[in-house]
Amino acid sequence: MRLLETTFWSAGGSRHAMAEELGFSKSKANALIAGLLEQGLLAEAGLQRSSGGRRPENLQLHADLGVLVGVDIGATSLGVAVLQPDLTVLAQHEEAADVRDGPAVVLARVRALMRELLGRCGRTARDVFGIGIGVPGPVNFEIGQLVNPPLMPAWDSFSIRDYLREDYAAPVFVDNDVNLMALGELWRLKRSLSNFLVIKIGTGVGCGIVCHGEVYRGAAGSAGDVGHICVDQEGPRCHCGNLGCVEAMAAGPAITRMAVQAAEAGESAVLAEVLRSQGRIEALDVGQASRAGDPAANAIVQRAGNLIGQMLASVVNFFNPSHVFIGGGITRIGPLFLAAVRQSVYQRSLALSTRHLEIQYTPLAAQGGLIGAGVLAMQQSLKARGIAP
């Protein structure tokens, strides 16, 4: 069981490497691997480079285990992907969506896309090994239900598992979307980092926490809900009811609100032209104006980055991560935002907390949520089926 889990997290390896990593004798490892090959759980997949002598055979999870389905539901978008057990994407689709339409509308579209993508891969519902779903709100992970989600109140206590169980016998696992991004990074890194944070900034602000190599969800599934940390007691009212939450002051909607104000006040000819021609301004427009050297856009980007950094400094002082990866739609705004976050964190955090701290945009970018959904589906399906611990 440990061998299968190690094979998944290491994206394969030789018999010798597996034995060394798990502390097994060569004979024990060979016997276990032979049994897993016979059961069709492991497969041999080509030869590795030789370090002298016979080239070792590479092991991986068997493709016949089935396919995984990953679903990444954001506040304003949704993505669905079909993946192999090694997380190779076979087919995927992303489109705009609005979670405020409610679970019936959004999940009906998700179910249609799942069926369409499986058909594109020549697969059916019977071929699905596990389903992982990310949603933009706090989740009770044990029962797979959202709990008082601020951005999507109509989803409170709705059972996504029961909804999909009508079509799929495969187990369904639901988690907060930023936790899936953290799982995606953990898999990309092959668990080489043990303590890091993933911050998602889009319509809202959330944080995925990896502690001792595992995603930490907290007592009730709301760990990492940093968007509602107050950064200004005189700030605007957040949709959660409190004043000055960092989400209300520095997330995507706040950036566009500041941009519209600057355009209407005549502070930016560039943003005013965008507003005139499009009838609205999006965060991406602010980023483009900033990269073009527009002073008002630069000020907006820096203010948002400083406020995110102010919040993040408190989290860094508390948790002392080695890395912070920033993802979500806001990453498209450009390098100035990241620079402002870094400057604010380094100014406000203890020197010991930031001595070796790295802050960067997530390398998985927009793929992070879907990859993380695949990780969740495989990891938890192995446990649910009794194949892995």
Image (spheres, rainbow, N blue to C red):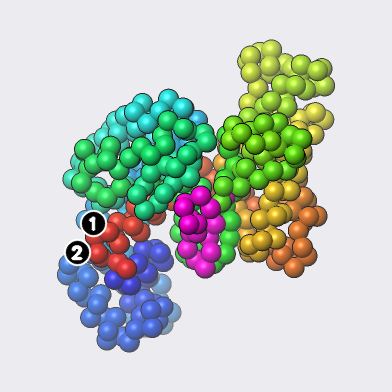
**x and y percent of residue 70 in the render?**
37, 45
Q: Which residue is at the far front?
A: 241
**x and y percent of residue 141 in the render?**
40, 51
Specify few, some or many for label 2: CA neighbours under 10 Å numbering under 14, 14-19, or 20 or more: some
Which numbered disc covers residue 40? 2
Give the camera-side residue of 297 and 222.
Answer: 222
Q: Write down the region rendered in magenta.
A: 207-223
Three-letter code for the amino acid on which mark 2 is drawn: Gly
Q: Look at the image and say whether residue 221 sits in the magenta stretch.
A: yes
Which numbered disc covers residue 110? none
Q: How many numbered marks appear?
A: 2
Q: Name the image quarter holding the C terminus.
A: bottom left
Q: Name the image quarter holding the N terminus.
A: bottom left
* Lower sequence index among marks 2 and 1: 2
SS category of the residue bearing label 2? loop
SS category of the residue bearing label 1? helix
Q: Which residue is mark 1?
A: 65
**x and y percent of residue 307 in the render?**
73, 43
- Determine if residue 170 is in view: yes
- Determine if residue 47 is in view: no
Answer with left or right where residue 91 lies relative to residue 190: left
Give the camera-side residue of 54 and 158.
Answer: 158
Q: Residue at x 67, y 31 (%)?
A: 237
